[in-house]
């Protein structure tokens, strides 16, 4: 999956070109919800994300020459956690108040 390109130019006609990033990742996770009262629930979520060797390209044009720019390494794992509280003041009020860290 790629994206559009972006170019930055200055008055000296130097160009910096960024191409899209081809990214492949997975993010399994889950959420546990405890209904404390009829109006309040507490939840906790955990997720793990893994990026599989994403590809990106960029180049710099200066004085009629083009140079390949350094490409960041986009791979690895991340873990996420989310505790929170959800409050519904009344079953007749279409309002949910949620807070999380």
Image (spheres, rainbow, N blue to C red):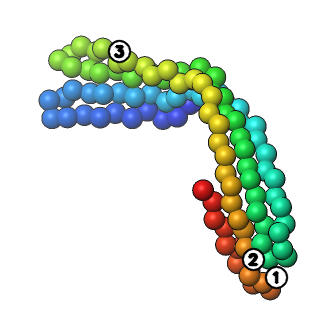
Q: In the picture shown, does residue 92 fall above or below 8?
A: below
Looking at the picture, how far across and down is residue 73, in whole percent? 49, 20
In-front residue for pair 86/56: 86
The alpha-carbon separation of the residues under discs 2 and 1 comes to 7 Å
In-front residue for pair 27/23: 27
Residue 86 shown left or right of residue 68 in the figure: right
Point out the tag, 3 or 2, that comes first from the N-terminus: 3
Residue 27, by quadrant, is top right
Residue 53 shown left or right of residue 96 in the figure: left
| Element at label 3 | strand
Q: Residues within 10 Å of mark 2 (few under 14, many from 20)?
A: some
Residue 88, labelled with which disc? 2
Residue 48, by quadrant, is top right
Looking at the picture, how far across and down is residue 74, in whole percent? 53, 24
Point out the tag, 3 or 1, that comes first from the N-terminus: 3
| Element at label 1 | loop
Q: Are marks 2 and 1 in contact (CB under 8 Å)?
A: yes
Residue 29 shown left or right of residue 52 in the figure: right
Q: Are marks 3 and 2 in contact (CB under 8 Å)?
A: no
The alpha-carbon separation of the residues under discs 3 and 2 comes to 55 Å
The residue at which mark 1 appears reads as 91
The residue at which mark 3 appears reads as 68
């Amino acid at each position: 999956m790629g994206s559009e390109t972006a170019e930055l130019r200055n008055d000296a006609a130097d160009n910096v070109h960024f191409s899209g990033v081809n990214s492949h990742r997975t993010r399994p996770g889950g959420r546990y919800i405890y209904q404390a009262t009829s109006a309040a629930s507490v939840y906790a979520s955990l997720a793990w994300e893994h990026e599989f060797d994403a590809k990106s390209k960029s180049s710099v044009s200066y004085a009629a020459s083009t140079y390949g720019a350094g490409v960041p390494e986009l791979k690895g794992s991340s873990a996420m956690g989310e505790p929170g509280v959800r409050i519904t003041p009344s079953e007749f009020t279409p309002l949910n108040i949620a807070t999380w860290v």
